[in-house]
Image: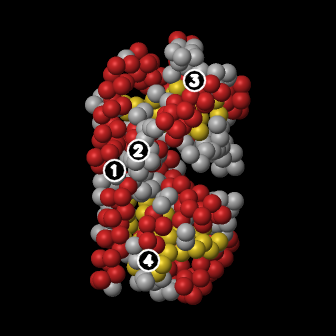
Amino acid sequence: MPKLVRITTVPVSLMVLLKGQMKFMNENGFEVTMISSPGEEVPKLLEQEKCAHIPVMLTRKITPFQDLKSLIQLTRILKKIKPDIVHTHTPKAGLIGMWAAKFAGVPIRLHTIAGLPWVESTGMMRKVLIFVEKLTAFASNAIFPNSFVQKKFMESLKIANGKMKVLGKGSSNGINTDHFTKNNTIEQASLLLKKQANLSSSGWVWIFVGRIVKDKGIAELLDAFIELNKHFPEDQLWLVGAPEPDLDPLEEKHQTMLNNHPQIKCWGFQQDIRPYLAAAKVLTFPSYREGFPNVPLQAGSMGCMLLLSDINGCNEIVEHGIDGKLVPTKNTQALLNAMMETRSNPDETNIFAKKIQQKIIDNYNQNTLWQIMLKEYETRLKNV
């Protein structure tokens, strides 16, 4: 069996963003090993994917001494495993993983780019992070941007020229449309959540799923919802995800809104987000940067209308005014206007929801993407 190593910075990325991929590859002829930092999610990850996991400390910040230590450790591990393919995700895992694989003599080195954190950086930091991206690409055989717009953007910066390829229609993992669909069990769970939140029968749930941090547009979303709620006091904003106070904390005034506003509900990280999406009318996703985000695919498959930022990835999922709405980033007024317009036109909202649901089913089926990735692996193995 050919050996495949999949590396991410933290285990939750393997467990959530790439859910099912490792198990699929293991069932289709590969001996799969997962590598990430240690974490409390690892036992669940092992149960979910049925593959081995090796912990290697990888930080999400710039930590030169720890990074060098991780590079040495990971190189030794790869020399011992002798994989045929190393496939990395997330920025730090890509940098350390691609160079460790190169030093260990791994013949096939692949990196998927699902987002570019440095897009929001400026000055010298931006230059450093772009250089790091180029270093990752230099050590790889192929780079898989998970959207066509992202590929074009990276080409404009001369990152990984000649090495880039988008798999399928984009996305890192596609969407299991059979899983992300409403059924009686999910509907009953969503009703219990609405009851727990004291949602009135005429109220809408506006939902956000993801990290509760500034670069996801949470500040603008909170400010816009506070104004919307003055006109539609029965509506609620549900936030499903965990904060990251060490990396990207919210300002105190927005933290106060989260803690004190009666119509803003913080549910924390949830392993199964389907009941929350089933309860929602609109996914509001005002992120500053993405690759090809999974959350809009999941929400759209569950029947939510999509109100997204007009950024890479998001604007490949939604065509503005046809099957959803797009708004500029960091613009509270534009977001509020779109939310007010959406709330005032429920028939149009329902039409958009149905259109995007069918589009996702037709174009982003998970099993199709996995088959494309499997074929990519097999083709590269034949050409080594």
C-alpha separation, residue under disc 2 versus residue under disc 1? 8 Å
Secondary structure under tag 4 reads loop
Circle 2: residue type: Leu
* Residue at 59% in and 57% down: 12
Mark 1 surroundings: few (<14), some (14-19) or many (≥20) residues within 10 A? many
Q: Is residue 244 above or below residue 339?
A: below
x and y percentages locating residue 128 in the rendered image = 52, 61
Answer yes or no: is residue 196 visible: yes
Q: Quick one: label 3, few (<14), some, or many (20+) residues within 10 Å?
A: many
Q: Are marks 2 and 1 in contact (CB under 8 Å)?
A: yes
CB-based contact (under 8 Å), mark 4 and mark 3: no
Which mark is on residue 236? 3
- Please give the name of the residue rendered at 28% of the width and 31% of the height, measured from the top-left corner: 322
Q: Identify the secondary structure beneath mark 1.
A: loop
Marks 4 and 1 sit apart, C-alpha to C-alpha, by: 24 Å
Residue where numbered disc 1 is placed: 364
Disc with the residue nearer the chain's start (3 vs 1): 3
Disc with the residue nearer the chain's start (2 vs 4): 4
Circle 2 is placed at which residue position?
A: 297
123 and 182: which is toward the camera: 182
